[in-house]
Image (tube, rainbow, N blue to C red):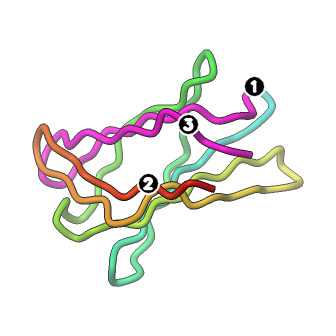
Amino acid sequence: FTVSGLKFTGDTNSQVHYRFVPSISSPELSYQIVFVDFRGKTFPIDTRCLSGICSGEAKLDGGYLGYSVSVSVTDGKITRSIPVADNLVFSQGNASWTPINS
């Protein structure tokens, strides 16, 4: 399981839009993106994927906190999770992060 086309865009100072393309795409699978801030606070978000592209918005505590991001996929029995980004910071119209290539 891999993720490509990862992109973040800050909508506000506490909300970020995300987009990614999982290597495995099927209506039977569920996807989740998880943001973890430097304090260890976790923000798991169930993600919708249409035509193989997963996207949505995450309301977080603040774009300046620096988040680690992972993506997981499950078929209800087996879950696979991979880290995809580190030190995500964002503000309105902007975002920067360090990609993690798995």
Depth check: 59 or 11 in front? 11
Amino acid type at circle 1 is Pro
Mark 1–mark 2 Cα distance, whole angstroms, equals: 27 Å
**Point 45% across, 39% down: residue:** 6
Q: Which residue is farthest bottom?
A: 39
Mark 1–mark 3 Cα distance, whole angstroms, equals: 19 Å
Which of the marked residues, 1 or 2, is nearer the chain's N terminus? 1
Amino acid type at circle 3 is Ser
Image position of 84 (left or right of 86): right
Residue 79 counted in the magenta span: no
Residue 8 pos. (x, y %) = 32, 42
Residue 38 pos. (x, y %) = 33, 79
Mark 3–mark 2 Cα distance, whole angstroms, equals: 10 Å
Image position of 11 (left or right of 34): left
Exactly how many numbered labels are in the figure? 3
Residue 99's disc is 2
Which of the marked residues, 1 or 3, is nearer the chain's N terminus? 3
Residue 27's disc is 1
Residue 4's disc is 3
Residue 55 pos. (x, y %) = 46, 32
Residue 2's disc is none
